[in-house]
Image (tube, rainbow, N blue to C red):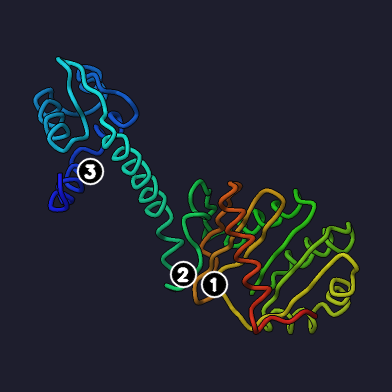
Amino acid sequence: MGPESVSDVLDIYTRRTDLLCLVCAGTLDKRELERQVDCSRPTIDRSFRELEEMGVLRSSGTAHELTAFGQLFCREFTRTRATLTTLTELSDVLSVLPRDSPIDMRLLRGATVHRAKEHAPQEPFLDVVDAAADATEIRGYSSTVLPSYVDAFYSLVVEEGMTATLVFTSDVVETLERNYPDRFADLVEAGHTAVYETATTEMYGLLVGDDVVAVPVGDDGGSLEGIIVNDTAAALAWGEACFEDLVSAEDTTEL
């Protein structure tokens, strides 16, 4: 099998997806495959011959097993299928982001998404509040001011004393100083908070809690598309790195 057969690999990926899922999961009995997939026995026989010719399977009499190449092939097939499934499921939310957005598969793999609905467009923001309420310390970035956000985070951070590092865009800082001067002053002056102002405006927000990341995503008109929530170690690492980039940016200053 050489470089010229890459198209053959992609071809069998698409033509035999359901069968490959079972083969890669360890189902190598043709009768069992015939029961589980919508394929005739001749089609299964032909598929096995193709996989043998590609070096994915080897046969011993009527039995088959994955080769070393086949194990690697299956690992990449499973990973690629999972990645494309995730991207497809989130395409409506991700499509509103700019091309240079830092969001990647570390955040997306294993995530759940709560989409905004026409009759309750702000309801998914509750996921951000919930993520914060369950934490002992939060780090957050916001380019949006919502009265419900102000109430919830004032209660958590100022009244209950939760440790917080927060980054707000200049527009948000201006709005908070104008509409909530006392509350914003309490937040900035609290001994357990660090508050930053940044000129960087992203089309997403960020909340990093103890063991969860919540990312609101909006379109260029300011409407919420949905909130991505993930509690995997990879997502937390992504969130922490993304937040540190915001804090250390040249246009970010501590208040």
Label 2 secondary element:
loop
Q: Quadrant of residue 48?
A: top left
Q: Quadrant of the N terminus?
A: top left
Circles 3 and 1: CB distance less than 8 Å? Answer: no
Which one is in front, 56 or 160? 56
* CA gap, disc 3 and disc 1: 35 Å
Q: Residues within 10 Å of mark 1 (few under 14, many from 20)?
A: many
**Mark 3 or mark 1: whose residue is earlier in sequence:** 3
Circles 2 and 3: CB distance less than 8 Å? Answer: no
In the image, is residue 141 above or below residue 249? above
The amino acid marked with disc number 2 is Leu
User: Which label was assigned to residue 97?
Assistant: 2
User: Which label was assigned to residue 203?
Assistant: 1
Image coords of residue 208 (percent x, y): 67, 58
Label 1 secondary element:
loop
Numbered disc in front, either 2 or 3: 3
- The residue identified by callout 3 is 13
| Direction from residue 147 to residue 123 in the image, left or right | left
Image coords of residue 248 (percent x, y): 67, 75
Image coords of residue 136 (percent x, y): 80, 52
Label 3 secondary element:
helix
Identify the residue at horizontal 31%, vertical 34% (top origin).
Answer: 71
